[in-house]
Amino acid sequence: MFPANFGYVAAKSVDEALQLLSKHGEMAKLLAGGHSLIPAMKLRLASPRTLIDLSTVPGLGGVKIEGNNLVIGALTVHADVASSDLVRKHLPGLADAASVIGDMQVRNRGTIGGSVAHADPNADFPVILTALNASFVARSSSGSRSIAADDFFTDFYTTAMTASEILTEIRIPLPPSGSGTAYVKLPHPASGYAVVSAGVIVTRQSSGSCASARVAIGGLGSGPIRALATETELQGKPLTPQVIAAAAAKAAENTNPMDDAYADAEYKRHMAVVFVRRAIEEAARRAA
């Protein structure tokens, strides 16, 4: 398949990209790594008249510490997130997710910002970033704003960003001492996308009990779902296999996943319980 004819502009700054968005309106699309947009264009699911390339904009990549946050530029490719010493030290669950996205070519070209802005309900980054309580910095001609992960993913392939905004960075709070993070998924054997996935951060008290937990699940809805009943079940309890299993058993409560050709809703709910348990166990092990 071939895409429809389109124009191409390489932006040299975020301000220029914003001006181009304003000029070309709703028929323009931002191009980051291209691993979501280009296939859609080839299938004529998207037919923008103009592509605005962000890969030529300096300063939108890299991983750094700012205050109490790990900050990742929106154009940072998956492979760089997976191999970052800062990510592996402070948030190994994020490195887990980055390392299992697609294949080597995808990981060396696709960007974290492009992934979250595309908001595929079976993508990896949205789930772990929701668990990690990340925030997303969106910039427009009127300034920048920060959108919490719990508010960012609003529907299938839809975020809280407006058409006039550009995602510039992701900010993740550095976890306190005694914390562990993890991400696991059941990949579709053909596409590698998550059939079901789970992202977790757990913080232990000095006694070994759970001080706090955030658990997010992918594959059960239009975007990441917080497993609030699981989080509540863990609160204040020792992170024993029995407690973890009981908490994970509540992970898929009140969810209504869609049947598809690979897995029906009952199977997805069951696997959500399995993979949430595995993620909590790994996060608790790292927290120790």
Image (tube, rainbow, N blue to C red):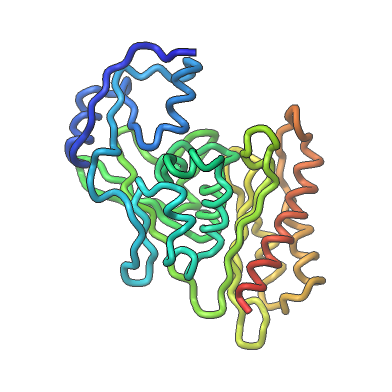
| 151, 275: nearer the viewer | 275
Query: Would you say 19 lies left or right of 247 here?
Result: left
Q: Residue at x 47, y 31 (%)?
A: 36
The answer to whether 190 is drawn above or below residue 1 in the figure is below
Q: Residue at x 32, y 51 (%)?
A: 61
Query: Would you say 28 lies left or right of 229 here?
Result: left
The answer to whether 228 is drawn above or below residue 256 in the figure is below
Image quarter hosting the C terminus: bottom right
Report x, y in % for residue 98.
52, 51
Report x, y in % for residue 129.
50, 54
The answer to whether 175 is drawn above or below residue 223 in the figure is below
Report x, y in % for residue 250.
76, 57
| 80, 223: nearer the viewer | 80
Query: Would you say 118 lies left or right of 211 here?
Result: left
Q: Residue at x 41, y 32 (%)?
A: 34
Q: Residue at x 36, y 59 (%)?
A: 63
